[in-house]
Amino acid sequence: MIRILQLPNTISRENGRMSVIMSIYRHIDRTKIQFDFAVSESSGDTYLDEIEKLGGKVFVIPSGEVSYKSVVKMVNMLLKKREYSFIHYHAISIWGVALNVAHRHGVKIITHSHATYFSDGFMKSIRNRIFSLNIKLYSDKLAAVSPEAGRTLFGKQQYIYIPNVINYKKYTFSRNNREKVRRQYNIDDGDFVVGHVGRLSKQKNHQFLIRAFSLLHASAEKYKLMLVGSGPLEDDLRTLVSQLNIERSVIFVGAKQDVTAFYSAFDLFWLPSLYEGLPTVGLEAQANGLSIIASDRISPELAIENAIFSPIRHKSDLQKWCHITLERDWPRSTDVMRTIEHSRYNYQHVLDQWKSLYDMK
């Protein structure tokens, strides 16, 4: 059996990279391949218990102690034991210094690009570009979740395109879940619910989402907005909702360990992110049969069946999202699983691609 040291920066359940890694980890043959994780401390709900049940180990640098020195010290300590065949680097962060350490120990390096921007902040973007300088020097293999994510981090270097996957059947539409969730949140049968799942952070562009929804709501009170997730911008977003006088039609659900049932309660999924590699929530929504309207900053590779991409750059784009929603019906797809099976998102195909990264057949 070989062991892989995963470097995703966090093991939080709210993190999209981790949801992808865990979907692979659950299905890979763990008698042949085992994952361990080196991360910064994660607050809230994490995958720690599940990782340990699957046989993995988690090594944590406590909050407030993450530094160049502490990362080098931890990775150096782990690689000295000679247990790892590869390190698999996922997040553009200070953990990138681990590549230098792995190179010195003769451990093979896989760098995996998950994003189309280095950061949503100017200074962080500069910092993360510096952290990424060693990727071209030391990486043995390069992988990306979309062509856009590959070009962002690797430029003209060759990489393996491996789309994100999820357990699609878990997200199959359920009439019982729909009725249960809508009853719990006092949503009437005739209401039309626009849904979003994601951390309440700048990247997810909730301000655009809420302002566009306010225009939609002005056309008819039947429209409701349901936001599943928590994050640093929650207070600001609640204030915006109050200012727009749409409090009765916007539901802040908060963070949920399992968001599966909420997709069945939605009628349409909005995803206006400022940047994404290949957002798993978009795959989850489509697996449920939902149509999605997504930002044109997101890779068109996201489209499985019913995805429309619309701009988010200007104030006039708010009206475009409203018009797209109003101008058509949004029936649920009933044959999406067949489409997935015959697409690049076929689970076994993607699992085989991951195995090839580790030189396993």
Image (spheres, grey):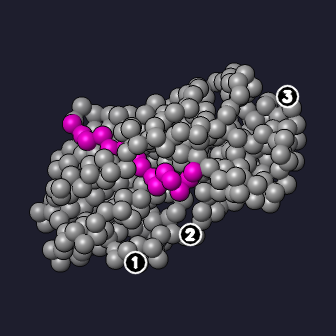
Please, what is the three-letter code of the amino acid marked with disc 2?
A: Asp
Q: Circle 1 is placed at which residue position?
A: 52
Most foreground residue, 219 or 182: 182
Please, what is the three-letter code of the amino acid marked with disc 1?
A: Glu
| Element type where label 2 sits in the image | loop
Where is residue 111 drawn, in percent x and y?
27, 51
Q: Residue at x 67, y 34 (%)?
A: 331
Magenta-highlighted residues:
158-172
Q: Residue at x 20, y 48 (%)?
A: 141
Where is residue 277 drawn, in percent x and y?
43, 41
Most foreground residue, 342 or 14: 342
- Extreme left residue here? 106
Q: Residue at x 57, y 28 (%)?
A: 308
Do the numbered discs 1 and 3 sit on residues whose CB atoms are within 8 Å? no
Q: Nearer the viewer, mark 2 or mark 3?
A: 3
* Above or below for 356 versus 65: above
**Magenta span contains residue 165:** yes
Please, what is the three-letter code of the amino acid marked with disc 3?
A: Ser
**Magenta span contains residue 194:** no
Mark yes or no: residue 142 visible.
yes
Q: Circle 3 is placed at which residue position?
A: 219
